[in-house]
Image (cartoon, grey):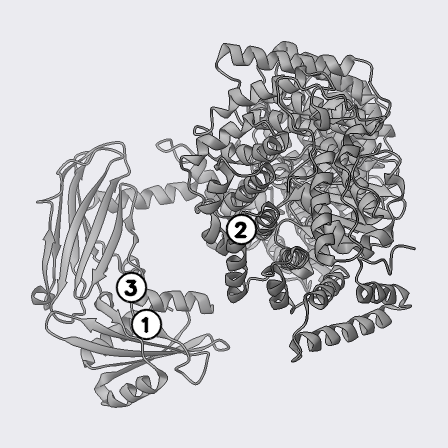
Amino acid sequence: MIKAILIFNNHGKPRLIRFYQYFAEDMQQQIIRETFHLVSKRDDNVCNFLEGGSLIGGSDYKLIYRHYATLYFVFCVDSSESELGILDLIQVCCYFFKMLCRKKQMVFVETLDKCFENVCELDLIFHMDRVHYILQEVVMGGMVLETNMNEIVAQVEVQNRMEKSEGGLSAAPARAVSAVKNMNLPEIPRNINIGDINIKVPSLSPF
Amino acid sequence: MPAVSKGDGMRGLAVFISDIRNCKSKEAEIKRINKELANIRSKFKGDKALDGYSKKKYVCKLLFIFLLGHDIDFGHMEAVNLLSSNKYTEKQIGYLFISVLVNSNSELIRLINNAIKNDLSSRNPTFMCLALHCIANVGSREMAEAFASEIPRILVAGDTMDSVKQSAALCLLRLYKTSPDLVLMGEWTSRVVHLLNDQHMGVVTAAISLITCLSQKNPDEFKTCVSLAVSRLSRIVSSASTDLQDYTYYFVPAPWLSCKLLRLLQCYPPPEDGAVKGRLVECLETILNKAQEPPKSKKVQHSNAKNAILFEAISLIIHYDSEPNLLVRACNQLGQFLQHRETNLRYLALESMCTLASSEFSHEAVKTHIETVINALKTERDVSVRQRAADLLYAMCDRSNAKQIVAEMLSYLETADYSIREEMVLKVAILAEKYAVDYSWYVDTILNLIRIAGDYVSEEVWYRVIQIVINRDDVQGYAAKTVFEALQAPACHENMVKVGGYILGEFGNLIAGDPRSSPLVQFNLLHSKFHLCSVPTRALLLSAYIKFINLFPETKATIQEVLRCDSQIRNSDVELQQRAVEYLKLSSIASTDVLATVLEEMPPFPERESSILAKLKKKKGPGAVSVTELEDSKREGGELNGGGDRGPDTSAMSASNAVSRHSVTSNLSYVFQSTPSPSADLLGIRSSAPAGTAPASAGNLLVDVFSEAGPAAPSAAVNDDGFLRFVCKNNGVLFENQLLQIGIKSEYRQNLGRMYLFYGNKTSVQFASFTTSVSCPGELQSHILSLNVQTKQVEPLVEGGAQIQQVLNIECLTDFSDAPLLNIKFRYGGALQNLTLKLPVTINKFFQPTEMSSHDFFQRWKQLSQPQQEAQKIFKANHSMDTEVLKAKLLGLGTALLDNVDPNPENYVCAGVIQTKGQQVGCLLRLEPNAQAQMYRLTLRCSKDSVSRRLCELLAEQF
């Protein structure tokens, strides 16, 4: 289980805090401080896992983190999670934070690797609510809800459209669903070859 | 610059955030935040109704302020308004606020639950998901109560959208984790298992977390998931990287799901069905094979995803521990990772290999990597990796490589990070002991340990070396010599002085022949450290000195001189002074014979689990030390030397032992026992002596004498204190000796009571002619009627180890003060045993609590104003004066404990009515504790004076 997701900058200022296990508010702050203290004193090219601090879970508790430029992304997890899996999950999250905050066309997933390096701190705080909503599509109650990036995009798109229709602001034209299918993606092969499992092509308009 | 004024954003919010960011100082920031909080508060409180947009904006600001680490204690109501709205954007932020700032205000939860209920029944999947999210994130008991039955329905309903199913699965998981008692298994359980077959991979991903958790708690009910998981895994593993489409991540098909499936399988033993097992083994082999294939991408994500699966597969192989072929392959794979350039992989490989080392199939294979691991310990830059390497060395250690590993760990200790030193020290100590073939090596190792990392050597470690030296004749001379040499270093650690003091005191004679270590040299060496040591060490040294006097009469004059000097005999520390005085006296009065007897060499320590191993386990938490390791240590430790929890505590070690074995004068025994002697451990020794064998110590003898004398001579032992313990409680052990245990359970209603007596035969021999009778002495005869033994009589035979039960029905006719007596007779091995006990039936058992207001209480108090109606006692506290303890006792009494009645909140007042057949007796009680003086004043006023008196007597013994 993911006990908490903490994002803070190089000075320990929290930028996104999400606890999936209940802790009183002052305890949350202590955990953030302790985690920052543990993570920030480590060199950049050491391993991304570390035995957790004393505050959350004792011995059955690990910190899995990434450090991008000015930000630390820390997932506090127990031993039931795969370390490398979580490490990938952090990248997926970063990718979405970046894309969604920039309000880019979110209909397709680009190659991931070029995007993480500069998730901007300001993006996170100026779009705090959005960042939470994206996170909700990936992690729920401390468990991973969805790992298919296109599926996540589809969900977020649904949200965006509902927002637009309510906001009455420059209601953007509906995203072209077909764009997804015709996009030529270098990294993620898209020739649809359904084996014995019937996989849905991400459809963007369930509604 | 990010979109401060983009159309969608909330301008006010962006401005506020910018303001905060521009604050030059912490004070300015706090000032700005307080201003904003005041503003929001006034807006929320204001008369003007806020529109959705403003509410959204303010709630968002509050979230931001919370993020900065400030407490938010308002806004919840507005958030609830928002989440009850029909607008999606308002609902969304309302739910977010509530999920982040959980508040247990019950009124609020009721409102939230209402809104959730509406959303769940709305049929709008987005709203349903929001509601499920909120439940999953908050996961409170109230929510579980409200929705635990609803969510399984949503989860398995045929028409539920996939995204809602996903959320419902995780939501249910959360509720199951927080309130397992509320999530009832039902017909949905079998359908949940079949979600593993769902077409939508996202549903499988979410469902598998739920199923894993449920399987851990109810493995049998979810057994069917094994075959489903295997076939799902097999389909994923054998698919081409293009098959799974969106769930393919950098050419790896569904890595996350594969990991989760492999985790689920780790909840179960290997499948019994041959076909399923075959399929699974095939999968595992495929995964291992794929690891050898050239990577399909150079990206780190590709290798991460692939290796995540690989590590889970290896965990599963280790978990099964039954396929030697796979185990060895796994080990080789990990061996490759040990030298991988990715630090993460090295870390994980070390960690995995640690568990692999405990399997008998792969232990040898793991050992082949010893050089790499030692190298990792020396050269890794990252302390967490080094720590893993140390763990692995510890796990792979056995007789063949112990010397090498211990030496490497010792040399690493000199530079080890402070954070892991203590654990390293324990591990070195354990390994040295466990695999010691020759004990001089062991002694060298531990002394080195003290030299290198003395500060981190805990008591357990140096106790242990002494225990071992004492138990092994062959090493004592060597130990004395080595420790003597070690003490010659100009600066040595205090722990070294302790070991030195102890060992030279016991075995200094073994090296005294050498003029370089003659008795006086030894003494002078020890005494040169004396003044630098702490009080406990000095106390230990004083004991060593008196042992010197015994071992080497020629040192007597010198040592007496030392003991006599003012800094000893007038030491401000009581313990040191007492030792100096008494040792001086002992050395001058006692004859050499007496001295030799008192200070006889320590007897061997009894064998028990190694105290250091126990400490390591405690440090790491249960489960950290593998079972094999424990068994190992039991076996090996046992054969090598006696273990023993008991530390050779400062001086007392030989002394208290000598005392118990030879019973010296009581005066002296006081001396020795006044030192912090391991009395608890003495008990431990006693209990560890197998029953029936000759007692090992005088203490044991004494106990035996008493206990045998008791039952052998027919006695009328009346259990006064046992009886008093039951005034405020109804259940417990009434009486216990070597032969018999009598337990009691009782319940009372109105003027009736029922008591269950449990007679347990503690011996292995049957009791014959077992009879019991209850008599009510004197006046009681007419008061407690019908102590009716329901089961005719108890069975006359009580088998060894058996327990029989007897029921007494009790009726209270009028108040009484003497307790009924229970008489028990039986034959044990020919001797007639006769026992009489007071049954804990007291007048207060028939209390009915009475609640009353302060006004009523004092009115009645005044009404009971005749002098004989009142009974009062002032007495000293015999037990803890803790409020909770007192309250529990007063409630156990049977009265109502009245709050807010006495003007002084420190005092306790109680009221109740005693129900007898003929009448009811009202009773009021007041207990005034005085914590400073450790005294109580107890006052009782009852409508019947005899009751006041009796209650007062009974209660005065309780506090």
Check if mark 3 and mark 1 are on a common chain. Answer: yes
Q: Is residue B27 visible?
A: yes
Distance between the alpha carbons at the discs numbered 3 and 1: 16 Å
Chain for mark 3? Answer: B
Disc 2 versus disc 1: nearer the observer: 2
Which amino acid does the dot numbered 1 rest on?
Answer: Ala
Find residue B647 and report its image quarter.
top right
Foreground residue among B180 and B523: B180
Report the side of B571 relative to B700 (left or right): right
To which residue does mark 1 refer? B896
Say what secondary structure mark 2 lies in: loop
* Above/below status of B453 relative to B23: above
- Residue for point 47% across, 39% down: B685
Q: Residues within 10 Å of mark 1 (few under 14, many from 20)?
A: many
Badge 3 element: loop
Q: Amino acid at mark 2?
A: Ser
